[in-house]
Image (tube, coloured by chain):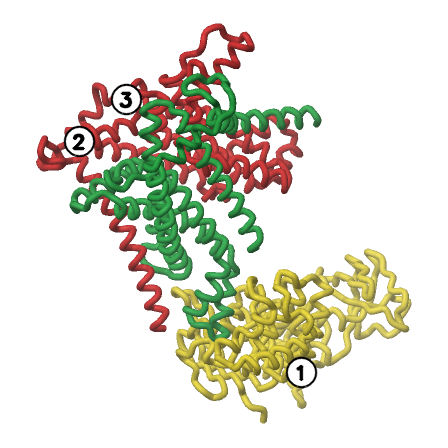
Chain colours: A green, B yellow, C red
């Protein structure tokens, strides 16, 4: 028994190390007082200062934030409507719709990116914020639907009948029963959408325009241009922000339930 | 004559060509505790849903308070349902759950407060108003579910197998409580269950259903002691079934019946003709078993040997075998006459039952 | 009744409209484009042709495609080998520890995959952490030329996609009826046999799901092969990106996309076939 525990623990630890060492190294190097060498030369905040003064980067970050907030909210609204509709009603093509959502989640992003590019170009729609918003919302909606639907299915079906029995209209049922019970799933879906939007490279690569610069694409071009310490600082900041978001959401969600 | 609060006339229900209910005619009296009893799939829950309005009959009419309710939504019918899973709103407090229906009807908050307090007091859960459902036990949740329905003062309360998810002891307690509650509230209860013991102990009248048909309607006593069909007799309690033949028809609805090689005089309200084949039903607890040393006059008795003896605590269940290999179930009670009740397998015994305690029904193959 | 129908009509219309415009229609356009031609002036133009698909079948396209499949398969296999035991061990943990471990896998998943791939550069490059450590330990003498090779791409893909293999397998194993395992042991099977003949077949849907979630992205996450493999590593994803945005040969790019989609459908069918009658096959 003990051998099993030791070997299992070691295995887990190794894999976790595999996951986290690169991130840890990155964060360390962001404080490394040297331009090119990877040998430790002393602690410095320089790269963060340089980061702070890079106004272009701030603009991209702001753009990504606006895009993420909008796409997440839009995707959550539409996704919730879709999930409730699929759950509640029988309609023609219901199975097809569910299958379509399933396929959308599994589709390679590049296919979706190319497809949307063709769509927008044919419509002569200029590439920019709107195309990004529409595209991001589209790939986020299936995740919201799946999260929300999964939660809906766990409800006692009789609850809706009981509400109707007691005189509630559909509107009341939605406002006072479905929404409050769905809250954690919606929050999870929103957060997931927000993160997906913030990190998306592939689809954005296809549908972004020259004017509206977003963070991931900026980082991508910076990385391709070569390793710069400023990138390390930027990445560390983003990792930190993401971690804080996760922690916040976990504590918030735990309080709600 | 008590008022009929619910009436079903000629009701049929089919779903996708599958017939679920056939020719249902039922009158439910105001203030009574009526149970729909039957095995799974007999249609009793569907019948309940037709009354509550969650389903519409394929044919026939349903009246509530003498009004045809076809097309009326559940909440427009002044009947409320208590679901098997209770269906309490998990994110609302007990108070909000109970007040829900009243709020939908836009009753004033002050009136809501007093009515909710009253009904919670009736189910003895006044102190739990601010709790959430998941903080209550199963029995408590059930009482809240009833309170939530009852506070709206419906004409009828429909209960769909509300006790089936409770354990044995709690069930017994809740049966008594429900009965008391029904009397206190004065509302008509329509109760659905597959447990015949439950139905017999709680109801004013029982509707026995099988495969979409109503087999018999009667008081618990009528349904148990005077089953009108073999199905009812077999479903409720245990019963021994013997084959017989009508030899003579006499006055006072008496018949001479040839059974197990002997002739017995039996009573029946059914019309039989001479020569007709019949079933004679005797319940195990009506069968008396005697060991040869206990009786002298065995002329009218049947001889049998003991196959199985099962000690049940308050009774001893016997399976005895007649000379023609028929097995008979007998239940013996411990009392002053029979305080030992010891039988051995293979032992020879004498069998009898009190004349008049049997039921005669037409023969069914 | 009326209000209910309004809500239903509205939400149905909105859902279908969005799905049509941003999912079905674009895909139909890709399908159409794959049969079109192009010119210097027009991105897409008639005549209809099968040339795009024919071209895929030889020359450089075929080589790139084969290379993609090899790299993707290798990555998937490695993910499976590393991920399955990992998932299995975690499902055997209890409550608090299990949630903690699960959380520790999901956290990297929330951070940008681009950033994490970038972080790998510092590890595997010539003077990177890995080489420094290996040389210091005396395991090798010269630094391994890992960066800008297919191996680097595989490492990057595994690094990014491992959680996607672990999670479906975990879900599947969780839903496994462990009484079946007990029954097998009771009937005399040793651990290995039980594993081989009971656990693996029952967890097949989870394994296939994991493969779907790893294999196709492995072929199409072009930024990983770009950053870690450079010009030496052109996978299907890079090819599509190139065709659409650089070479402006949309029909070709479209044909490639369709081929990938067909592969996806094939894999889904395999998944459905493997999970027929198997309750623990629902991993979504």
In the picture, which quadrant includes the C terminus of chain B? bottom right
The number of discs equals: 3
Q: Give the quadrant of residue C64.
A: top left
SS type, badge 3: helix
Residue shown at 26%/51% (left/top)? C20
Residue C64 - label: 3
Pointers 2 and 3 in contact (CB under 8 A)?
no
User: Can you tell which of label 1 and label 2 is closer to the viewer?
Assistant: 2
Q: Give the quadrant of residue C144.
A: top left
Residue A48 - label: none
* Residue A11 in sight in this render: yes
Provide the residue designation for mark 2.
C248
> Label 1: how many residues lie within 10 Å, few (<14), some (14-19) or many (20+)?
some
Is C185 left or right of C218, judged from the image as shown?
right
Is B288 left or right of A208, judged from the image as shown?
right
Residue A127 in picture, x, y percent from top left: 22, 43
Q: Determine the chain carrying the residue at label 1.
A: B
SS type, badge 2: loop
SS type, badge 1: helix
Q: Nearer the viewer, residue B331 or B124?
A: B124
Q: Determine the chain carrying the residue at label 3.
A: C
């Amino acid at each position: 028994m003990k051998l099993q525990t030791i070997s299992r623990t070691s295995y887990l630890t190794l894999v976790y190390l595999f996951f986290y060492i690169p991130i840890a190294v990155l964060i360390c190097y962001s404080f490394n007082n040297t331009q090119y060498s990877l040998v430790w030369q002393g602690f410095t905040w320089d790269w963060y200062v340089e980061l702070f003064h890079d106004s272009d980067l701030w603009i991209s970050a702001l753009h990504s934030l606006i895009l993420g907030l909008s796409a997440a909210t839009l995707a959550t609204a539409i996704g919730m409507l879709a999930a409730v509709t699929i759950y509640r009603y029988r309609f023609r093509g219901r199975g097809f719709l569910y299958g379509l959502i399933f396929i959308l989640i599994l589709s390679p992003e590049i296919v979706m990116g190319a497809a949307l590019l063709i769509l927008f170009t044919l419509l002569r729609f200029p590439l920019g914020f709107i195309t990004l918003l529409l595209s991001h919302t589209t790939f986020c909606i299936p995740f919201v639907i799946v999260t929300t639907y999964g939660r809906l299915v766990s409800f006692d079906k009789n609850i809706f009948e009981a509400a109707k029995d007691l005189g509630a209209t559909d509107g009341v049922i939605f406002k006072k029963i479905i929404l409050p019970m769905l809250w954690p799933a919606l929050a999870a879906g929103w957060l997931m959408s927000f993160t997906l939007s913030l990190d998306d490279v592939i689809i954005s690569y296809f549908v972004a325009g020259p004017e509206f610069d977003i963070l991931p694409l900026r980082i991508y071009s910076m990385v391709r241009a070569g390793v710069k310490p400023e990138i390390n600082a930027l990445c560390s900041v983003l990792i930190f922000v993401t971690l804080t978001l996760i922690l916040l959401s976990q504590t918030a969600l735990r309080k709600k339930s | 004559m008590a008022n009929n609060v619910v009436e079903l006339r000629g009701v049929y229900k089919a779903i996708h060509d599958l017939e679920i209910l056939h020719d249902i005619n039922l009158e439910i009296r105001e203030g009574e505790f009526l149970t729909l009893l039957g095995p799974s799939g007999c249609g009793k829950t569907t019948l309940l849903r037709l009354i509550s309005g969650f389903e519409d009959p394929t044919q026939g009419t349903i009246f509530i308070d003498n009004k045809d309710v076809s097309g009326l939504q559940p909440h427009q019918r002044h009947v409320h349902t208590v679901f098997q899973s209770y269906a309490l709103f998990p994110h609302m407090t007990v108070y909000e759950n109970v007040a829900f229906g009243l709020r939908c009807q836009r009753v004033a908050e002050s009136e809501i407060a007093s009515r909710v307090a009253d009904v919670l007091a009736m189910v003895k859960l006044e102190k739990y108003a601010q709790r959430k459902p998941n903080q209550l036990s199963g029995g408590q949740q059930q009482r809240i579910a009833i309170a939530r329905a009852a506070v709206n003062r419906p004409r009828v309360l429909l209960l769909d197998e509300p006790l089936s998810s409770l354990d044995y002891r709690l069930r017994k307690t809740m049966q008594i409580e429900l009965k008391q509650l029904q009397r206190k509230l004065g509302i008509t209860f329509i109760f659905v269950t597959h447990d015949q013991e439950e139905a017999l102990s709680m109801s004013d009248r029982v509707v026995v259903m099988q495969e979409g048909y109503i087999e018999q309607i009667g008081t618990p006593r009528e349904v148990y002691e005077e089953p009108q069909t073999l199905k009812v007799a077999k479903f409720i309690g245990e019963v021994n079934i013997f084959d017989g033949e009508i030899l003579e028809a006499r006055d006072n609805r008496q018949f001479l019946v040839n059974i197990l090689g002997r002739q017995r005089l039996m009573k029946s309200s059914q019309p039989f003709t001479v020569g007709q084949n019949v079933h004679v039903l005797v319940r195990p607890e009506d069968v008396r078993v005697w060991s040869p040393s206990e009786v002298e006059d065995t002329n009218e008795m049947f001889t049998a040997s003991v196959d199985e003896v099962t000690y049940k605590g308050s009774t001893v269940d016997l399976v005895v075998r007649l000379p023609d290999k028929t097995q008979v179930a007998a239940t013996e009670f411990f009392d002053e006459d029979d305080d030992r009740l010891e039988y051995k397998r293979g032992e020879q015994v004498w069998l009898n039952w009190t004349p008049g305690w049997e039921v005669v029904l037409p023969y069914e193959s | 009744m009326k209000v209910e129908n309004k809500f239903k009509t509205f939400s149905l219309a909105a859902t279908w409209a969005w799905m049509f415009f941003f999912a079905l229609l674009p895909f139909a356009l890709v399908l159409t484009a794959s049969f079109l031609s192009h010119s210097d002036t027009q991105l897409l133009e008639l005549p209809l042709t099968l040339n795009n698909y024919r071209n895929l079948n030889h020359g450089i396209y075929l080589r790139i495609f084969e290379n993609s499949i090899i790299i993707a398969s290798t990555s998937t296999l490695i993910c499976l080998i590393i991920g399955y035991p990992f998932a299995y061990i975690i499902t055997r943990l209890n409550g608090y520890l299990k949630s903690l471990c699960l959380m520790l896998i999901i956290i990297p998943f929330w951070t940008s995959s681009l950033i994490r791939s970038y972080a790998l550069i510092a590890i595997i490059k010539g003077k990177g952490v890995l080489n420094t450590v290996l040389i210091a330990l005396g395991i090798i003498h010269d630094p391994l030329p890992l960066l800008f090779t297919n191996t680097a791409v595989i490492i990057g893909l595994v690094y990014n996609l491992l959680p996607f293999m672990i999670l479906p397998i975990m879900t599947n194993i969780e839903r496994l009826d462990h009484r079946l395992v007990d029954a097998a042991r009771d009937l005399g099977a040793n651990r290995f046999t039980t594993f081989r003949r009971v656990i693996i077949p029952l967890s097949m849907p989870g394994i296939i799901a994991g493969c779907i979630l790893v294999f196709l992205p492995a072929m199409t996450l072009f930024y990983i092969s770009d950053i870690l493999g450079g010009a030496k590593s052109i996978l299907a994803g890079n090819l599509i990106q190139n065709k659409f945005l650089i070479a402006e040969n949309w029909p070709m790019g479209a044909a490639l996309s369709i081929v990938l989609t067909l592969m996806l459908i094939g894999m889904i069918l395999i998944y459905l076939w493997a999970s027929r009658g198997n309750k623990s096959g629902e991993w979504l």
